[in-house]
Image (cartoon, rainbow, N blue to C red):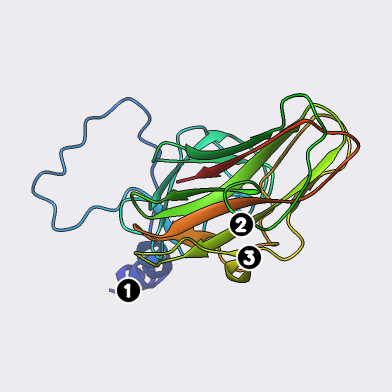
Amino acid sequence: MKQLLALLVLCAPAMAQRPTYDIGVRYRIDAGAASITRPNRTGTGSPVGRDGCSSVGETYFQSDATAGKNLFYCTTTGAAGTAVWTPQTALRTISAGFVNGGSALTAGTTFPQYAVCTTAAGAGTLVGYTIQVDTGTATFKLWKNSSATALPTVSNSISTSGFAISSGTKVHSTTLTDLASTTFAAGDNLCVQLSAVSGSATDAKIILEYF
């Protein structure tokens, strides 16, 4: 009896541990009758630029994201900050171009000469932008309002310094800290303003990327 009791005591810690299994491709799992299934890593905040992943195909569910935009896939492995997480939804764009028929562009605050506007058909979150110029430099700012009868003006700017290109003819960035808000709702009016331009640029464009 003493020997049996000692054996049970020694086994208790091991039994309390929760084992993990790598099933690979050797087994079939039917979870049709399961009371709960949760195959994704779950957390708050986007994993983009923050979380690492060790295998392509890992998934992350962002619990505080807009419904339908919660799931991310690891498409390139790496440590935190270098792994590539691709959202489940398709990337969409808003483009605004300014052309002056071969003459140098000028900047301003009035619509439609210096601002290109649209109304959002659905909600979205801005995730990046690309700026293109033929030469020189350009700076763009974003205006937003939710009015049903009036477009936003410079007083509705959600930009601080603006998105700029200072060298070369193209720049792409996912840094959006210049904006007071990166989200918009269905029905919001969005205007892209050419707020500054120099160096004889005659063609300047910005492409906003959002999900």
Left or right of residue 137: residue 5: left
Q: CA gap, disc 3 to disc 1?
A: 80 Å
Instruction: Give the amino acid at mark 1.
Output: Leu
- As rendered, which of 156 and 94 lies closer to the eye? 156
Res 142 label: 2
Determine whether label 3 and label 1 are within 8 Å by CB. Answer: no
Q: Is residue 167 above or below residue 147?
A: above
Res 5 label: 1
Determine whether label 1 and label 2 are within 8 Å by CB. Answer: no
- As rendered, which of 125 and 42 lies closer to the eye? 125
Left or right of residue 122: residue 192: right
Q: Is residue 168 above or below residue 7?
A: above
Residue 153 pos. (x, y %) = 57, 64
Image point (48%, 54%), residue name: 125
Secondary structure of residue under mark 3: helix
Q: Earlier in the sequence, mark 3 or mark 1?
A: 1
Q: Nearer the viewer, mark 1 or mark 2?
A: 2
Q: Which residue is mark 3?
A: 154
Instruction: Give the amino acid at mark 2.
Output: Leu
Q: CA gap, disc 1 to disc 2?
A: 73 Å
Left or right of residue 50: residue 211: left
Q: Earlier in the sequence, mark 3 or mark 2?
A: 2
Image point (69%, 62%), residue name: 177
Secondary structure of residue under mark 2: strand
Residue 107 pos. (x, y %) = 76, 49
